[in-house]
């Protein structure tokens, strides 16, 4: 019996798996080399999109390799992946499937052997490496388990398999009946999961991290093993901070309501002498559509894929031409849109027009939804809401969720910012909105209270901060852009400072200025403001 049949997944579109950035080789090339070292290998099958076929054949020809089987589909779902692997393993009479994405340049030969040995020793049905960053080891699935999962995917758990192929999709299918399987893992010497590293080359962001890791390993003469590469990455800012994943853009300076947990109104009043209410500012101070269009082009060129949020420190729906702003983002299929609103200006007509634009440009290539909605509600009673929010409308906030959900099913999230004041209504809020029959179909967000580096009074009912401080996620992955193009180091700086202007200097130049702060954080040196921050561990996209 052929013991191990190896599967390389090459169905991601777009992908940077074929970029020759590793001393003239691509991640795909390095992955091919890894397959040659797998013990008891009975064959290698590449599961590819039709879009990648020519690139794969070219890479195989250049390497003078002709013993690979290629299976093509226009697009792959988890169901297709499972069913195909099950059929191929059965046809080859192999015992196990060894599965990995083909965009991983650092697959560790020794760790792979350890995973396979563990799988065999404990007669496991599924074995993986736990605690390591993504990209160092394959998953190993027994042939019988694949047969069971194939039934899950086509019959008993079809919904769980009706998803795009991802790094978690096989395990997520297993989890539908996890107690039925013998699962084993090879544990990393330390837990790297909090670092959220992904050493694959599916995106430009991850490609850059891999490229920088490769070059740094050569420079420092570090062995290309999972543990040593992971330790190297922990101390390197250029690997941790690559490209922004989330841009929070202020298209409107004004607010329709003023919640007590927002530091922005007082910061605005301090700078301009009035509160940021439309009645006081006559709709002034927003970012023009022309400038926004240019900004979106910069983002698409620099980050390639990202989520663009509207609006940092303002109510985006106060912008009368918000549909055009949305279209500017959505016409690029690598970008998604996040709209945070208090719900007071949501109408059925607006939702319908935005849904039409969303449908026009099709699904996203970045794995996110076209438009994500967050509606701040923060209460279950009008009395509580009124005590927390000035100038708002509880009725409009609640009803806006249903209006939006009709046009954006599964993409609307009522939000509760958890504070001492509204803590008594937290459970009721959760129970109501978490119900699948609620207007949001079960979606909701419980948001931690942020005192904005002690700018606001302490109101948090629970301390959720990690026991040990680590470098700020927001500085590594986010960029806040104000309506005039100025960029604070992070949103905690509000309107107090700027490290540059995107319209004058460009995103790339400004982004490089934040690297010094990441280096300081890695070294354990935090500025006075950073030391006061209680939001560094939260994660946007």
Image: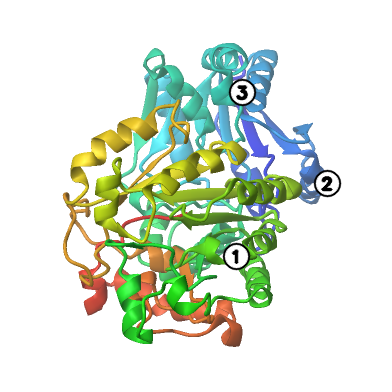
Seen from the viewer's position, the closer of residues 69 and 149 is 149
Nearest to the eye among marks 3 and 1: give it: 1
**Mark identifier at residue 82:** 3
The percent position of residue 158, horizontal first and vertical second, equals: 58, 19
Query: What is the distance, in whole Å, between disc 2 and disc 3 at their CAs?
Result: 24 Å
Q: Is residue 531 above or below residue 413?
A: below
Secondary structure of the residue carrying numbered label 1: loop
Q: Nearer the viewer, residue 262 or 362?
A: 262
Q: Earlier in the sequence, mark 2 or mark 1?
A: 2
Residue appearing at x 51%, y 15% in the figure: 145
- Residue at image mark 2: 54
- Residue 133 in view in this figure: no
Residue at image location 50% in from the left, 35% down from the top? 168
Graded by Cα atoms within 10 Å as few (under 14), some (14 to 19) or many (20 or more), the crowding at tag 1 reads many
Q: Nearer the viewer, residue 7 or 464?
A: 464
Circle 1 is placed at which residue position?
303
Report the Cα–Cα distance between label 2 and label 1. 26 Å
């Amino acid at each position: 019996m052929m013991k191990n049949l190896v599967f390389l997944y090459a169905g991601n579109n777009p992908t940077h798996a074929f970029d020759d950035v590793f001393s003239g080789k691509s991640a795909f090339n390095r992955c091919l080399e890894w397959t040659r070292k797998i013990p008891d290998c009975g064959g290698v099958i590449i599961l590819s999109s039709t879009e990648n076929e020519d690139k794969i054949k070219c890479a195989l020809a250049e390497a003078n390799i002709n013993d690979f089987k290629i299976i093509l589909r226009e697009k792959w779902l988890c169901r297709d992946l499972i069913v195909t692997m099950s059929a191929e393993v059965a046809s080859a009479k192999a015992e196990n499937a060894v599965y990995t994405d083909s965009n991983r340049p650092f697959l560790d030969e020794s760790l792979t052997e350890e995973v396979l040995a563990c799988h065999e020793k404990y007669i496991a049905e599924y074995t993986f490496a736990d605690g390591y960053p993504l990209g160092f080891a394959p998953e190993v699935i027994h042939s019988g388990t694949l047969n069971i999962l194939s039934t899950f995917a086509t019959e008993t758990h079809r919904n769980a398999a009706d998803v795009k192929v991802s790094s978690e999709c096989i395990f997520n299918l297993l989890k539908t009946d996890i107690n039925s399987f013998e699962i084993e893992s090879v544990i990393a010497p330390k837990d790297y999961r909090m670092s959220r590293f992904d050493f694959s080359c599916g995106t430009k962001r991850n490609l850059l991290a891999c490229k920088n890791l490769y070059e740094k390993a050569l420079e420092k003469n570090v062995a290309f093993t999972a543990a040593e590469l992971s330790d190297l990455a922990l101390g390197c800012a250029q690997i941790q901070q690559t490209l922004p994943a989330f841009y929070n853009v202020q298209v409107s300076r004004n607010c329709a309501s003023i919640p007590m947990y927002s530091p922005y109104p007082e910061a605005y009043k301090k700078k301009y002498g009035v509160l940021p209410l439309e009645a006081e500012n006559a709709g002034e101070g927003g970012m023009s559509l022309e400038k926004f269009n240019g900004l979106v082009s910069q983002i698409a060129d620099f980050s390639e894929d990202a989520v663009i949020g509207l609006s940092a420190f303002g109510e985006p729906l106060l912008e009368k031409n918000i549909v055009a702003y949305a279209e500017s983002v959505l016409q690029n299929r690598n970008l998604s849109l996040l709209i945070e609103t208090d719900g007071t200006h949501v109408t059925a007509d607006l939702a319908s027009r935005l849904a039409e634009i969303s449908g026009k440009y099709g699904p996203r290539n970045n794995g996110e939804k076209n438009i994500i909605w967050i509606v701040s509600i923060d209460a279950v009673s009008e009395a509580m809401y009124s005590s927390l929010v000035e100038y708002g409308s509880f009725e409009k906030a609640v009803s806006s969720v249903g209006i939006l959900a009709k046009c954006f099913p599964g993409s609307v999230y009522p939000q509760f910012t958890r504070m001492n004041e509204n803590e008594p209504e937290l459970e009721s809020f959760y129970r109501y909105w978490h119900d699948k029959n609620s207007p949001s179909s079960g979606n909701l967000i419980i948001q931690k209270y942020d005192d904005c580096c002690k700018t606001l009074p302490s109101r948090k009912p629970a301390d959720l901060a990690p026991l040990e401080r680590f470098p700020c996620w927001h500085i590594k992955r986010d960029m806040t852009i104000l309506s005039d193009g100025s960029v604070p180091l992070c949103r905690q700086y509000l309107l107090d400072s700027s490290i540059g202007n995107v319209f004058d200097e460009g995103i790339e130049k400004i982004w490089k200025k934040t690297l010094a702060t990441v280096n300081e954080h890695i070294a354990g040196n935090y500025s006075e403001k950073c030391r006061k921050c209680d939001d560094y561990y939260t994660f946007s996209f």
